[in-house]
Amino acid sequence: MDHAVYRKEAFEKVTGAARYVGDYETPGLHHAELITSPLPHARIRSVDVRAAVAVPGVRAILTGRESAILCGEVLEDRPPLARGRVRYCGEPVAVVVADCEAAAAEAAQAVRVDYEPLPPVRSVREALAEGAPRVHPDLGSYRIAQQPVAPRAGSNVADHAKVRRGHAPGALAKAEVVVEARYSLPQVDHAAMETRGVRCEILPDGRIELHTCSQAPFEVQKAIATYFRIGVGSVVVHTPLVGGGFGGKAPVQLEVIAVLCAQAIGGRPVKLINSREQDIAASPVGPGLEARVRLGATRAGRLVAAELEYWLDIGAYADSTPRVARAVASACTGPYRTDDVWCDVYCVYTNHTYGTAWRGFGHMPMTFAIERTMDKLAARVGKDPAELRRANLIGPGDRTPTQVELNRNLLGDLPKCLERARELVGWRGRGVRGEGEDRHVRGQGVACFWKTSSSPPNATSGALITLNADGSVNLAVGAVETGAGTKTTAALILAHRLDIPVEQVHLHMDVNTLVDPEHWKTVASMATYMVGQAVLDAAEDAVRQLKHMGGVVLKCSPEDLDVGRGRVFLKDDPDLYVDVKDVAHGYQYPDGDSVGGQVMGRGAYIMRHLTLLDPETGRGMPGPSWTVGAQAVEVELDTRDFTYRILKAVTVLDAGRVINPAVARGVVMGGMSMGLGYGSRECLMYGDGGELLSNQLRTYKVMRAGEEPEAYHVEFVETPQKNAPLGARPIGEHGVLGMPAALASALSAAAGVELDTVPLTPERIWRVVREAGR
Amino acid sequence: MRRDELALDVNGEACRVLARGADTLLEVLRGQLGLTGAKPGCENGDCGACTVIVDGAPIKSCMMLAQEAAGRRVRTVEGLAGTAAQQAFVERFAFQCGYCTSGFLMVAQALCEAHPGADEARMLEWLRSNICRCTGYEEIRAAVRDAVARAKAPAVQGTEPVASASRQG
């Protein structure tokens, strides 16, 4: 476990052999092309397809009129193709199916849609204003697919999640110090390098075969079965290697359109791949956030109350955002101790691209609001920002906003993380002039985070092991390989349990719902936790069988035996053994007669003791543990033009136990890079008319080489989690969480102003400084 | 739709393809030759996932017409075998999802050939053409640094075949 193990698929990925969903092309595969809305809000008067159908090779053109399906993981509010009206720029309005890509593209351009523009809802503020246009006039009539969700008919509020612990308004009225701040943070794109795409074919017996780059093939399977009213078993979903997900491939969207396309051409195979422009505009993004934070404290800076309002800009459709809202509610204070907490999280419809899960499930913007306010509180009470945080860290014995009593096992060691982060960044806690050229000012910022899974209480995972005749092991799990090394980690856990080299564990990188055991979704940083438990369970099953066979061969009780290093051996006399390979497919006696059969282990896991949150108080158990950590950033700001360099970026998190150090470090660093991207340059920008302005990678800017911090410092504290495989805590999302806040605090310290939004471009810093009259 | 026969030299092999005038090199490599290592990421030159080497220079194959490639030497990631760049990318964990990797590898390979021993500034200039969304770039830069250094000192190059190196101490 201590040395770095290469990803199982490493050599495929450096030779071009790694195959993704768009890499398959066969004769007879049709191509589908979306026609998307250029307007944020409009009535569709008519769709004229006459010129389009005349393009040679066109087989079908579909609009929203052809299907009555409404989609939605939580609230069924979204037609797969717009019906009657469009609600965001980029919304799929029609789809062309043709025998080749060029014909589909040509026909798509020939489709004429006549729109009657409606006034767009361009922000959360506009959505909540008196007399605002309704994004969903029929909100009260939508079917709820998954409770809890609380849509408010006659408004633009799709959901409202609450936390009521103690009496925050009363406590705030009595507090010696109250800080209040508001934040407005933009939507964020996942910008996975592989755009979303799918292939679909319907077999003569009605079976629907889908190939999709999904983080949730088993959810796709269920959703398609529901929408098309067939048995779950009659939908088979295949997911090959996935080119990055970050939450954007968890929702079900293009799959539904692809099935409609395949139906329209008699079940023949069809491929639908987003262009980059469509991937940003048409497929879901990370929600924006408006926040109002009120913190009450003693004069010494001890928190006594928090009153929090968060409004998620969910865009045109709800997708999984009601679940995001509950995740935000359950973590609403950040990792700080507060007895009186009231929190309201609203999902607000706007005419923006719709929202879904984004790395951190709402925690990144929420953490920004809390952490920036903690800095303001520190300034108000005259404390060092890191010291103020240390004094308020939540710990064992404290209760979370949803009233879970914490212990070290559930929480990990946050004080240790913060202390180490301070050391690594060389914490000074204020702006410092550079030496020599005095227009350069250095600033530092710190942020703490926590996050739990907020997964459904019945989320499951499974593992199947079959033994080969050479004693090596095949492992099948239902988690998707999106790049986080999930499959390799599963193999490592199995290798560890069986005490064999990881090279002797074989696994397939794709997921096939027909043969692989179900895994809820590869999201919430939970794959290793859940898959790992299932793998260990399956290993136990295989070991039991091996011991049984060993007992037969060695003429002893199975209890006398152990398994490891390719042998089944006597515990008290390891030299007496039988090779695993000799019992893997049954044992053959010297006379030729045989006993037993192939050893196959099966393992299953289901979440334990999680509960839905109480609709009035929020009380409930949202996940199996909290991963905690501290982050810090040091910048050097050029006060002449407000450009800056990120000198250091630090993350110290309690990983429980690190299973594959190089991979773990890489995943955390990647998260940090993404968080710094959101803090410094990424932004889904909308124009005055509500039109999306940033739908390409030249306008939606992500980090490039050379823009990363001059030094990354990633370290792990290891407080093993008892109920986790090998003690490993979830770490996949967490690198992103506090980075934008730490960057904003560092730049605020350097510039001497309060920078309370992102992205912090030089121009934005300049504007704030100018307005402050500095 | 009119398609013309085109003779291409890809990875040292003479290939004949049928291409429309508007077909990009990327489309032809992937759709007709099955060389899917080059990936579409944006198809307008922003991301570099489709990078191949044409006559020694890294080229975004989504920005080049297939016809323009006729008579020139095209190399794709499938044509790399046992290079220092591939080995370094594995050893340095310079990828996660792998989608951008072929493009970065081709930039790295072209850099090794054009500027063995390239300094940090030149390396960075070349790497800025491509986007990776998973890593923090530190790993990619470390890998390219290794590859460039090995290209400068051929004596230590390729002493160990890539496929046998499965662990790092």
Image (spheres, coloured by chain):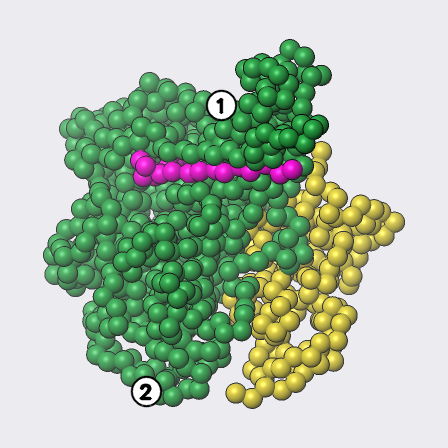
Chain colours: A green, B yellow
Asked if the stretch drawn in magenta spans residue A466, the answer is yes
Query: On screen, A204 above or below A471?
Result: below
Front residue (pair A44, A364): A44
Residue A217: mark in rendering:
none
Circle 2: element type? helix
Chain of residue at mark 1: A
Query: On screen, A682 above or below A735?
Result: below
Per the rendered image, the range of residues in magenta is: A449-469
The answer to which of marks 2 and 1 sits earlier in the sequence is 2
Q: Give the residue at x 30% y 64%.
A: A80
The residue at which mark 2 appears reads as A50
Q: x, y percentage for residue A382?
A: 36, 28
Q: x, y percentage for residue A140?
A: 13, 55
Q: Give the residue at x 29% y 44%.
A: A323
Position of B135 with respect to B92 (left or right) is left
Callout 2 amino acid: Arg
Front residue (pair A390, A9): A9
Residue most extreme to the right: B155
Circle 1: element type? loop
- The quarter of the picture where residue A228 lies is bottom left
Q: Is residue A204 visible?
A: yes
- The quarter of the picture where residue A134 lies is bottom left
Depth check, mark 2 against mark 1: the one in front is 2
Query: On screen, B24 above or below A626?
Result: below
Q: x, y percentage for residue A707?
A: 57, 52
The residue at which mark 1 appears reads as A719
Callout 1 amino acid: Thr
Q: Give the residue at x 47% y 45%.
A: A516
Chain of residue at mark 2: A
In which quadrant of the rendered image does the C terminus of chain B lie? top right
Position of A323 with respect to A708 (left or right) is left
Front residue (pair A384, A373): A373
